[in-house]
Image: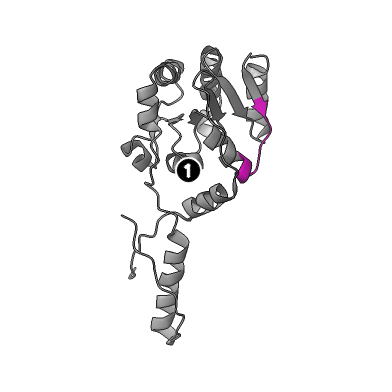
Amino acid sequence: MPGRVHITGNTGIDALLAVLDELPAAAPRDPASPSILLTCHRRESWGEGLANVSAAVREVASLAHIDVIVPPNKHVAATLRRRLGDCPNVALLDPCGHRELVQRMRGCDLILSDSGGMQEEAPALGVPLLVLRDKTERPEGVATGNMRLVGTSVERIVSETRRLLSDPAALAAMARVGFPYGDGKAAPRIAAILADWLDSRHGQVTGISAPASPA
């Protein structure tokens, strides 16, 4: 198929940065009281995966306060509530909108998640992410050092969480802000490319110019 490929960046990062601009200033973190944010919902995590993640959470709950966002899926929600509902230092939270989720991500010290979207957003927020998957289609975040694959192994989740929470330098190394998926200017680039295409086909003059391409 004839055509051209344009690298613009991910519009999801545009949306993330727009939300960040609207949020109030973040409260300072207390190194003595670390917090973890957990989401786990993908179908491949069901069954043994969810059981293992829950067991790992119970093991590390003595090290940090853990907010668990319970998804609307009835099977996953029931599993998480049954396995973690009585766990001290763990709060089971209802699903939330994007703004609140970004605020919670920004405010925690470590994220544990199997979410693809959070893999894209965590580096731009500078929040370390342990990915609850054995493989990822977003290796750029691993390459920048912002996230690490741990799968759903109880041993790996617990050991990596313990290591990061006990080693401020290692945690800080993963907390550097990075933009492997775009710099927040994807939307104007896309608009400019479309305008150029329309101009070439129909002779329309739009006056839209494209920003510089992302590095």
Q: Is residue 41 magenta?
A: no
Tell me where residue 137 appears, x and y as whole percent: 39, 42
The x and y percentages for residue 39 are 56, 31
Is residue 94 in the magenta section? yes
In which image quadrant can residue 96 be found? top right
Residue 33 visible to the viewer: yes
Q: Residues within 10 Å of mark 1 (few under 14, many from 20)?
A: many
The structure residue drawn at horizontal position 47% and vertical position 41%, both measured from the top left corner, is: 125
Q: Is residue 42 visible?
A: no
Query: SS for tag 1?
Result: helix
76 vs 130, nearest the viewer: 130
Q: Quadrant of the N terminus?
A: bottom left
Camera-side residue of 34 and 116: 34
Q: Is residue 37 left or right of residue 155?
A: right
Stretch in magenta: 92-100
- Look at the picture and state if 70 lies above or below 120: above
Image color mode: one colour
In the depicted view, which residue is nearer to us: 165 or 22? 22
| x 39%, y 60%: residue | 8
Q: Quadrant of residue 83?
A: top right
**Mark 1: amino acid:** Glu
The residue labelled by disc 1 is 121
